[in-house]
Image (cartoon, helix red, strand yellow):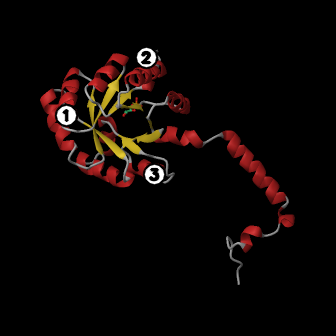
Amino acid sequence: MKFFLDTANLDEIRQGMSFGVIDGITTNPTLIAKEKRPFRDHILDICNLVKDGEVSAEVVSTDTEGILREAREIATWHPNVIVKIPTIPDGVRALSILSKEQIRVNMTLVFSAPQALIVAKAGAYFVSPFIGRLDDIGADGLTLLSEIMDIYRAYDYPTQVLAASLRHPLHVVSAARMGAHIGTMPYKIFEQLFKHPLTDRGLEGFLKDWEKARETLGDVFQSAGARKPKR
Ligand code: E4P
């Protein structure tokens, strides 16, 4: 499973990249607006930070002509930029044209299996079902994800499923168990993936016990050069 960070914040992206397991970034107009910088410059800065990773940048037009104009422009910014388009009728019309031009498109704001089926037929590169936002209205985001995985497998669609709007580590685990190609998550959810109170408590105990027995353990790490003796 690929891990993407759902953020436009450069500090979070830098931090995330330092763990060596982040494969790409998704942004949306809300996340970009928070950073208060020119859109193109900011996306290019993100591309430079994530090196080979794919970076989604979203159009803001809602008519087919406008979407096409913005998408073709965004696609020229960087070889790793993926154009993000909302799953509205004009967005689907634009997708059908752009996929024939080999422009890679992430179809976003997907909330139903029929929407996912349509965008796969129209040639989407990524489909982004929003899991958490469905849970927010009392529906079941993970059921939608499982339906999409079944449909795509049945027909061998090449569209990659990007599980979006993930709100907690269990969403990530469930998406991984279903075989979603990518999970995109805010930085704080990514951090929660490797934090566990029992790990912290266990380590605290190990170090306390080590300290108590220190005299008898020998100076292994010091002699290996970790701590140089003062002269
Ligand atoms: C995905 O690409 C979206 O930017 C994102 O996952 C939306 O998540 P939210 O529901 O937490 O805003």
**Labels 3 & 1 near each other (Cβ < 8 A):** no
Helix, strand or loop at mark 3: helix
Residue that numbered label 1 is attached to:
100
Q: Does 132 sit above or below residue 186?
A: above
Left or right of residue 29: residue 143: right
Q: Which residue is at a point 55% across and 33% down the rendered structure image? A: 169
> Quadrant location of the C terminus?
bottom right
Residue most toward the right?
Answer: 216
Which comes before the other along the chain, label 3 or label 1? 3
Left or right of residue 159: residue 2: right
Q: Does 173 sit above or below residue 51?
A: above
In the rendered image, residue 178, in percent from the top left (x then y), is placed at 50, 27
**Quadrant of residue 28 within the rendered picture:** top left
Q: For the residue carrying disc 1, how many other residues have a C-alpha within 10 Å: few (<14), some (14-19), or many (20+)?
A: few
Closer to us: 112 or 41:
112
Residue type, numbered disc 2:
Ile
Residue type, numbered disc 1:
Lys
In the rendered image, residue 56, in percent from the top left (x then y), is placed at 32, 40
